[in-house]
Image (tube, helix red, strand yellow):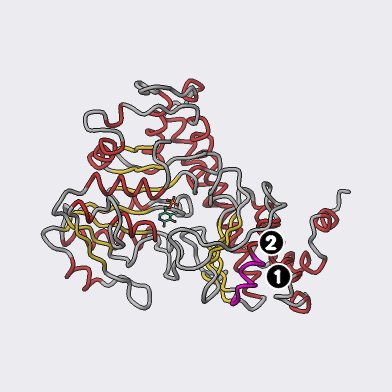
Amino acid sequence: MTDIKEIYKSLHIDDDVYEYALKNLDSLKERFLRIDETAEFNQLKVLKAFQECRVSDACFQGSSGYGYNDLGRDTLENVYSKVFKTEDALVRPQITCGTHALNVALSSNLRPGDELLSPVGKPYDTLEEVIGIRESCGSLKEYGVSYRQVDLKADGSFDYDGIRRSINDNTKLVTIQRSKGYQTRPTLSVDGIGELISFIKGIKSDVICMVDNCYGEFVERTEPSEAGADMIVGSLIKNPGGGLAPVGGYIAGKKECVEKAAYRLTSPGLGKEVGASLSVTGSFYQGLFMAPTVVSSALKAAIFASSMLKELGFSVYPEPDTLRHDIIQAVTLGSAEGVISFCKGIQYAAPVDSHVTPEPWAMPGYDSDVIMAAGAFVSGSSIELSADGPIKEPYAVYFQGGLTFPHAKYGVMRAIQQLKNDGIIDSSALTV
Ligand SMILES: *Cc1c(COP(=O)(O)O)cnc(C)c1O
């Protein structure tokens, strides 16, 4: 069996779903070329950093105990600084996730009496507890750090007047979330972030501007650190880990900011000097090396899903032809059955746990049941093909990731097949 249609059929894709996908992909060729060009640029940028930092076999050795003089760890942090064009970087397996990285960056650079400002509306869910917007043990609020927020305007633009009014003597740090996360606001472009930062620095030049860079790395040719951000922060089980990093986070930026973060992550007096890399360093390097093309696969997958589902009549966000600044695709299925069916399809397409059926459950921290489809090599990794949806109005799923485009393409097709199998869509909708 060498026929492509046959192998799809053996993986439960009907002819009409296959033909429908083919037609759809045809219309996306130009878009995909642009994405490949960005991946090419970013691949070379990463390669150049590896070469300039003289990455060698010895860098993959790892360390144990205190982790003094860990060549691999220190060189990797130089590579990240070069890629992100920052003075310094902290890239560690001891940073447990994106939320932790953001918490370390914030809590280390803020002191009692300081104020934190979000000029782009409500931050990512988990940050509400870090900041203390929702009462939480150990929040910044408990340590005497106050918080202010200026929402985006209805059209998604910055509320410059509101931001100007909110900056005061205590404003020490501004947090800017690049990705929309699981909200329906536009994701910010690097240029847009740059404009916002220069506006803020024009009012108060010494304010620290931090960008939550989750889901944004390598989507564009530049990163927010090249547009004036003092710190950019992210998770290694998203874009920059390239699907290979099994854990970790990074904070890259001004030397002073990164040093403070290191003294907080480890201990005053120790900072960046300690922190054994154990045996993960090799995967951090290789993952970063793979990240530009992995991100390009995820971007194509998001656009393909958007295009396929829009044509079936679902409302999608962003639209297929919108310029992307992150890898998340939202699709409103409009019913609990639709959300469950879509997530089942994604799960059945996975390389891991394809034989299990996801069910909605009451996840801690959410106010409704949530269904999640993953089947990932790295638990919870959302650079791998994944989807999740809260079982509540408007019954939307958030879809992201895809280590390779052929797999992500199949995942989208399998999800549409599942919608067909479950009677959510009619075969007549698929006629080419
Ligand atoms: C994923 C994410 C985070 C952090 O999430 P973790 O699950 O803790 O890694 C923070 N902000 C945004 C925008 C994210 O997408």
Residue most toward the right?
Answer: 1
Secondary structure of the residue carrying tag 2 is helix
Asked whether, in this view, residue 248 is left or right of residue 14, the answer is: left
Identify the residue shown where x is 48% and y is 20%: 58
Q: Quadrant of residue 432?
A: bottom right
In contact (CB < 8 Å): disc 2 and disc 1: yes
**Which image quadrant shows ligand 1?**
bottom left
Question: Magenta stretch: residue 11 in it?
Answer: no
Query: Majority secondary structure of the magenta segment?
Result: helix
Identify the residue shown where x is 30% and y is 26%: 273
Compared to 360, does 380 lie above or below?
A: above
Q: Position of residue 117 (x, y in %)?
A: 24, 61
Compared to 126, does 235 lie above or below?
A: above
Q: Position of residue 424 (x, y in %)?
A: 70, 75
Q: Amino acid at mark 2?
A: Gly
Identify the residue shown where x is 49% and y is 48%: 239
Identify the residue shown where x is 40% and y is 27%: 276
Q: Residues within 10 Å of mark 1 (few under 14, many from 20)?
A: many
Q: Position of residue 305 (x, y in %)?
A: 62, 65
What residue is shown with label 2?
345
Question: Magenta stretch: residue 341 in it?
Answer: yes
For marks 2 and 1, give the CA distance: 8 Å
Residue most toward the left?
Answer: 169
Q: State whether label 1 is within 8 Å of ligand 1.
A: no
Q: Quadrant of residue 146?
A: bottom left
Q: Position of residue 62 (x, y in %)?
A: 46, 24
Q: Earlier in the sequence, mark 2 or mark 1?
A: 2
Asked whether, in this view, residue 283 is left or right of residue 251, the answer is: right
Q: Which residues are magenta?
A: 334-342
What residue is shown with label 1?
419
Secondary structure of the residue carrying tag 1 is helix
